[in-house]
Image (cartoon, grey):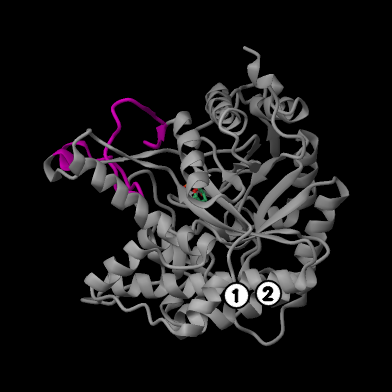
Amino acid sequence: MAFPKNFLWGGATAANQCEGAFLDDGKGLSVPDMLLGGDVNTPRTFCPTIEKNRFYPSHQAIDMYHHYKEDIALFAEMGFKCYRLSIAWTRILPNGDDDSPNEAGLAFYEDLFRECRKYGIEPLVTIDHFDTPIALIKKYGGWRDRRMIDAYLKYCRAIFTRYKDLVKYWITFNEINMLLHMSFMGAGIAFAEGEDKEQVKYTAAHHELLASAKAVKMAHEIIPDVKVGCMLAAGQFYPYSCSPADVWDSLEKDRDNYFFIDVQARGEYPVWAMKRMEKAGLNADFSSEDIETLKNGTVDFVAFSYYSSRCTTADPEIFAKHAKPGNAVFRSVVNPYLKSSEWGWQIDPLGLRITANTLYDRYQKPLFVVENGLGANDTVEADGKIHDPYRIEYLKAHLLALRDAINEDGIPVMGFTAWGCIDLVSASSGEMKKRYGFIYVDKDDEGKGTLARSRKDSFYWYKGVIESAGASLDEE
Ligand code: BGP
């Protein structure tokens, strides 16, 4: 059984994880430029000034800034119909809110989009992928300040106007719900001592939701036939047991994340969120104008990343006993029914079908799987080959589950872009060795390597999947 005819098969990357060239052609600094590397147990640390002799993984990354033609040619060889990438806000507006955009930055992406189109590859562009400009953090303290909305819209206007004939698919914020879990990476927010964190987070969330709604409206005014989506870091919370308290706990944890998409897809805050905020004494600084803005800026599709399901319990003792080790972003307990990756991410293909069904039941908008994949250590053999059956196995199982969601459950899914289709810097750990790619990049965690690209076994496998519209998944 095949996937739909116009299914957008492809891969996904983010500017700060692959481009490098962090100061070239007038680019300004953004959050990832100041992050040092970590590892599976150690979160990345922010370094407020750039210091010599320290290694910043994103400064060179895989230098896609200078390799994009070669990389897009490889994507085309695999048969990509779509390439999800992000624009670096500070290549366009180096200070985040400059009055006129930086022509060199605009020209870079224009060339890149033309290169995609040359091969019939549809660009899908994330406007802000964990990329808050440092200048705006200094000026406003990140998204806690309402003036961020105008800065973001200035940036949107510049890119919508310039690329209106080249880009028809957009996502306003990468994994918007990450703001609650990684506030600095997600929204440029550092907390002062004793500050009410919840108040700051929900204020920032309100600002991002308004910015997103206004951007959706603006895109529809400027770009003919445009489709604009929101994006969730998805993965259903399962109750650790069938105790009602665990079920309630999982429902509440899911709501924390769905909250954002509830607003972006339906145009209003859900009742439970209003109640919860009222009880917590949180003030979202609503005006009737805000209410109108949210109503008029609902998205055309719901995009999501899916790596794993999550698991939770209301019992603090059980939680402590089974808590996931490492620096997991979502606090979760280990699900005893699932295996884990080398980085402790649990592998649950059926969870993708469950998540897709839940999202569609909730929103009735077309879905787009814009990230999925396995981060793993790869070995280059003496003959230069890279055998990665584990990656193929992971992706195959997830694509089969997605195909069931489409063909068995009837859910409209626009496409699938595998995360890190070319090896890149890990967002959570800054490592290179946590590789997701079909294309191997010769670069290590100390920054050494030739940057040469080579095809892994999964490269040929994915090419076959796309060529057969998914029919090859039925082969042994
Ligand atoms: C998502 C981010 C990506 C990406 C991916 C994998 O949260 O949108 O930027 O990196 O996760 O995570 P990691 O790189 O930490 O393995």
Q: Are marks 1 and 2 in contact (CB under 8 Å)?
A: yes
Give the main secondary structure of the magenta stretch. Answer: loop
Taking the image as shown, residue 246 lies to the left or right of residue 405, namely left
User: Which is nearer the eye, 23 or 402?
Assistant: 402
- Residue displayed at 77% across by 74% down: 161
Q: For residue 336: magenta?
A: yes
- Tag 2: amino acid: Met
Residue 313 visible, this angle:
no
Q: Residue at x 32, y 79 (%)?
A: 283
User: Which residue is identified by label 1?
Assistant: 214
Residue drawn where x is 38% and y is 82% of the image: 285
The residue lying at 43 percent from left, 43 percent from top is: 235
Element at badge 2?
A: helix
The residue labelled by disc 2 is: 218
Task: Determine the secondary structure under disc 1.
Answer: helix
Determine which quarter of the picture holds residue 384. Answer: top right
Magenta range is 318-347
Does the beta carbon of the residue at mark 2 sit less than 8 Å from ligand 1?
no
Q: Is residue 369 left or right of residue 111?
A: left
124 in relation to 34, above or below: above
Residue 431 at what x, y percent from top left?
48, 46
The N terminus appears in which quarter of the rendering? top right
